[in-house]
Structure formats: structure tokens, C-alpha cells
Image: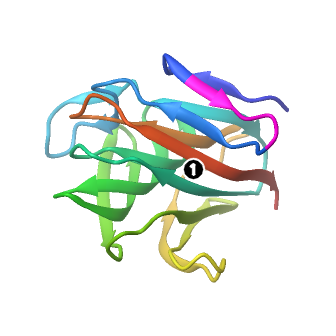
């Protein structure tokens, strides 16, 4: 199964030796639908592969965050109105573990404060039928903590992978290491 881009960034690279995926986000990119802000954006960067049935996606995320809402992490997408994104989001000059779930065209948002000077965050999303288990590890020991358990309808095919965006900023560099997506 090969990966493909939804809204490919102008600049990205996969290091053949380390397998680190580096993305320079384009400005004014995001995934969001309606709630609170009243707008729809579906122009964030999403690098994914198609999965069927239950799966697990794990990745280590780092970034050079600088502008409000700069974000990088994992996305699970059924279509433009039903998806989940989770990862690090830069809010009020601090990094937060963030989850946005969008169902039937409306997004919600939750955040968890992270320790100061966080350099990287492990993320894991596991699908079990209609449930998505979202977990994070901010210590680097893969001792995951639950961030959220949410519902996303089952579909025959689901897009799973990494996402990043710069809703208010001019772009930033995001780094994804040890990306692993497999049947669960």
C-alpha cells in the first residue's frame, strides 16, 4: 500500500536513511468545519494510505512551531465531513496535545497542556470497529496515556496517516519519525 497526498505541500522530503518525513507547511492551511468559527477549511496537508478494518497508526512528531494553531500529527479520514486529527497544536505560545473530531460536517476541539520545552510527542490512534482510541506519550518511553475515545463510523476504506497545517501562520517545519500503520 502506497502513500498519497491530499493537498500536497510545496516542500516536503523523506530521508532515505532515517525515514524522517519533513514537511514545510504552506500558509493558511487547516482542517476545520463550521463549529464556532463559521468557516470550512479542507486544505491542510495529509499524507496517507488506505486501510480496511481495524488498524493502529503510530508516529513521533516534532515541529518548529511558531504561529497560533501550527499543528502536526495523525489524521483518520473517511471524507471531508467525517475525520479525526490529533497531535501537537501551538496555542497561546505553548504546545498542547490536541484532538479535533469532525462528524457530519461539524468539528469539535479539545486540548491538553504539555510540559514546557517539549521536543517531541509520540501519538497512537487505534481503530476498533467504530471506536478510535487516541493516545499520547510525552516522556519518550511509549507509556501511552489516553487522550480521547471517540466514535467514527465504520467504512470499508479509511485514509490514515500524518497531517500538518498552519491556519494563521506562514508555515513551519514538521518532522514525522517512525511512522507505522498496520492492521490491528
Quarter of the C terminus within the rendering: bottom right
Q: Toward the viewer: 7 or 105?
A: 7
Q: Which residues are magenta?
A: 12-17
Q: Residue furthest front?
A: 17
Give how far across and how far down residue 120 sits, in percent.
Answer: 51, 63
Q: Residue at x 57, y 26 (%)?
A: 12
Element assignment for label 1:
loop
Give how far across and how far down residue 25 sits, in percent.
Answer: 42, 30
Q: Residue at x 27, y 28 (%)?
A: 170
Q: Toward the viewer: 115 or 156?
A: 115
Q: From the viewer's perspective, is 58 left or right of 30?
A: right
Q: Is residue 153 above or below residue 105?
A: below
Mark 1: few, some, or many residues within 10 Å (few <14, many ≥20)? few
Q: Is residue 44 above or below residue 62?
A: above
Quarter of the N terminus within the rendering: top right
Q: Tell me the residue that label 1 is attached to.
A: 153
Q: Residue at x 54, y 79 (%)?
A: 139
Give how far across and how far down residue 4 sits, in percent.
Answer: 68, 24
Q: From the viewer's perspective, is 80 left or right of 37?
A: right
In this orientation, does residue 8 appear?
A: no
Give how far across and how far down residue 95 sits, in percent.
Answer: 32, 62
In this orientation, does residue 141 appear?
A: yes
Is residue 167 magenta-colored?
no
Q: From the viewer's perspective, is 112 left or right of 73?
A: left
Amino acid at each position: 500500500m502506497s502513500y498519497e497526498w491530499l493537498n500536497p505541500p510545496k516542500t516536503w522530503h523523506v530521508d532515505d536513511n532515517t525515514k524522517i518525513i519533513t514537511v514545510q507547511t504552506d500558509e493558511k492551511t487547516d482542517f476545520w468545519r463550521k463549529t464556532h468559527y463559521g468557516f470550512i477549511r479542507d486544505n491542510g496537508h495529509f499524507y496517507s494510505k488506505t486501510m480496511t478494518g481495524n488498524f493502529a497508526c503510530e508516529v513521533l512528531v516534532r515541529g518548529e512551531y511558531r504561529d497560533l494553531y501550527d499543528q502536526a500529527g495523525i489524521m483518520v479520514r473517511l471524507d471531508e465531513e467525517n475525520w479525526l486529527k490529533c497531535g501537537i497544536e501551538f496555542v497561546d505560545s505553548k504546545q498542547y496535545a490536541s484532538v479535533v473530531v469532525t462528524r457530519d460536517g461539524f468539528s469539535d476541539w479539545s486540548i491538553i497542556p504539555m510540559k514546557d520545552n517539549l521536543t517531541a510527542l509520540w501519538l497512537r490512534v487505534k481503530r476498533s470497529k467504530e471506536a478510535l482510541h487516541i493516545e499520547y506519550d510525552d516522556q519518550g518511553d511509549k507509556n501511552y496515556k489516553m487522550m480521547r475515545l471517540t466514535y467514527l463510523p465504520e467504512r470499508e476504506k479509511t485514509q490514515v496517516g500524518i497531517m500538518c497545517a498552519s491556519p494563521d501562520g506562514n508555515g513551519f517545519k514538521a518532522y514525522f519519525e517512525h511512522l507505522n500503520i498496520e492492521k490491528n
